[in-house]
Image: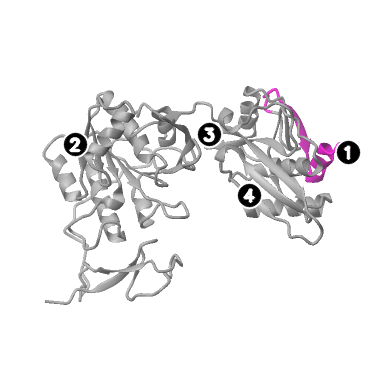
């Protein structure tokens, strides 16, 4: 009998090496290679695959194919992130920090789908069925016709549904706890996660069940396990937020049946997760007296505009002290760039001042259109001159100091007008889209600085 071959698999990216090494050559992570037994048969001769298979059917691009039907979950914000609801036969991966509320959200969705007349099964690999039942009773969902089970064997799960009608919605919590007896290795390893997910996805496609897989996340916030897992599923959702904050954001990272970058906003309460219909009001503080260092920025999340408040604070230091730069909710490299442009192109000095920047409400910004709003907040904080309370600001800042327009300017202005804002600080090339907001256009960042400082 031939001795089984050994291989070393990276637990971060799934790459395979023939010998152990401290650093993975593909993802550059350290100490992630674990030894696994190889079940790949080595062929001594070349096999011909041109024959013995079945002929596949080809269709044209103009074929009349109906859009996949969707099953609403009953949670509007969840359906928004999914692109309109669950698609039969789809596989969705949802990841988030421990304790963020993934199980609570899926249990609420499962209960509403079951109450709507669909068959639902919830398989927990981390908790006993009684623990899930107690959580459901605490959330007021104890009477929902959801079938529960505690299992970690993929073979047992698929055997349970093989001889009877498959459920319309199946929750696996979590994929890292599942194991297949066809693969060697402990649950949670790359080979086990990949094999278990592959079998569950095959079941979803064959039986028309919408499968929801819960995934753990690493320290940097990415979904743990092999990257191939994200390519295997149809939709990838990220549940974001801080456990110390009340608010949660469900973000679509990948969606084969809908748009990406859509978000659903929730608030964690005593009765579970509550939907937030107006996120703009959530991330804005009470607009009372004008305060220096604050601006309002209309961000875009997919097709949804969300108004957030940007807060800046500058503190002058004694000569010789090293100033500090602290950022919460935005890219620190982007802040350094804006500070450099303000110093080099606008003549402002931040070299002797500590700079603190915060996005209110725990929101995280990645939109380059926030450049102008951040610059306005910094100038306002440095000069201690407030930006008008009912004004919003957006636009991209170039290294030359030029202000460039950004996408969806009309939607941003309409959302601002709907919430009572009457003016906007924008690039000069942005045309009025009929929103009713008075536009203040600037070609260069220096023009905006002069406007905020009252120079002209």
Say which residue label 1 marks.
455
Sequence-first tag of 1 and 3 = 3
Say which residue label 2 marks.
166
Secondary structure of residue under mark 2: loop
Magenta stretch: residue 440 in it? yes
In the rendered image, residue 359, in percent from the top left (x then y), is placed at: 61, 41
Say which residue label 3 marks.
303
Q: Identify which residue is drawn at 74% across, 47% down.
A: 314
Circles 3 and 4, Cβ within 8 Å, touching? The answer is no
Sequence-first tag of 4 and 1 = 4
Q: Identify which residue is drawn at 29% across, 71% down.
A: 7
Secondary structure of residue under mark 4: strand
Secondary structure of residue under mark 3: loop
Tag 3: Cα neighbours inside 10 Å, few (<14), some, or many (≥20)? few
- Separation (CA) of disc 2 from disc 4: 49 Å
Sequence-first tag of 2 and 1 = 2
Say which residue label 4 marks.
327
Of marks 3 and 4, the one in the foreground: 4
- Separation (CA) of disc 1 from disc 3: 37 Å
Secondary structure of residue under mark 1: loop
The numbered dot on residue 156 is: none
Q: Identify which residue is drawn at 75% across, 55% down.
A: 340
Q: Read off the magenta span.
A: 433-456
């Amino acid at each position: 009998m031939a001795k089984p071959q050994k291989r070393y698999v990276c637990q971060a990216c799934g790459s395979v090496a023939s010998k152990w090494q401290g650093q993975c050559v593909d993802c550059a992570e350290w100490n992630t290679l674990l030894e696994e037994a190889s079940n790949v048969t080595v062929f001594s001769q070349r096999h011909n695959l041109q024959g013995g298979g079945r002929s596949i059917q080809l269709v044209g691009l103009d074929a009349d194919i109906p859009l996949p039907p969707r099953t609403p979950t009953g949670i509007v914000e969840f359906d928004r992130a999914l692109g309109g609801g669950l698609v039969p036969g789809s596989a969705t991966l949802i990841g988030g920090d421990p304790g963020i509320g993934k199980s609570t959200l899926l249990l609420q969705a499962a209960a509403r789908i079951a109450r709507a007349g669909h068959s639902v099964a919830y398989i927990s690999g981390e908790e006993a069925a009684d623990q899930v039942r107690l959580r459901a009773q605490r959330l007021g969902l104890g009477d929902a016709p959801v079938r529960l089970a505690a299992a970690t064997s993929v073979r047992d799960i698929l055997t349970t549904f093989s001889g009877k009608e498959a459920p319309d919605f199946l929750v696996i919590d979590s994929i890292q706890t599942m194991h297949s007896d066809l693969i060697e290795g402990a649950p949670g390893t790359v080979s086990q996660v990949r094999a278990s997910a592959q079998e569950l996805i095959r079941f979803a496609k064959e039986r028309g069940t919408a499968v929801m897989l819960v995934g753990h996340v690493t320290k940097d916030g990415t979904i743990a396990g092999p990257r191939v897992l994200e390519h295997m599923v149809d939709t990838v959702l990220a549940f974001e937020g801080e456990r110390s904050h009340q608010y949660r954001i469900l973000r679509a990272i990948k969606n084969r049946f809908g748009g990406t970058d859509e978000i659903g906003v929730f608030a964690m309460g005593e009765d579970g997760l509550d939907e937030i219909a107006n996120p703009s009001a959530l991330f804005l503080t009470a607009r009372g007296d004008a305060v220096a260092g604050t601006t309002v920025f209309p961000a875009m999340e997919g097709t949804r505009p969300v108004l957030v408040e940007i807060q800046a604070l500058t503190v002058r230091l004694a000569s010789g002290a090293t100033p500090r730069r602290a950022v919460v909710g935005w890219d620190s490299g982007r802040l350094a760039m804006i500070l450099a442009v303000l110093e080099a192109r606008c003549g402002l000095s931040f070299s002797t001042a500590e700079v603190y920047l915060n996005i209110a409400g725990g929101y995280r910004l990645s939109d380059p259109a926030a450049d102008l709003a951040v610059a306005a907040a910094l100038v306002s904080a440095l000069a201690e001159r407030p930006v008008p309370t009912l004004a919003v600001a957006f636009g991209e800042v170039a290294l030359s100091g030029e202000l460039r327009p950004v996408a969806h300017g009309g939607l941003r202005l309409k959302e601002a007008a709907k919430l009572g804002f009457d003016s906007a600080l924008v690039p000069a090339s942005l045309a009025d889209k009929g929103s009713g907001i008075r536009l203040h256009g600037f070609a260069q960042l220096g023009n905006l600085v002069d406007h905020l400082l009252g120079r002209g």
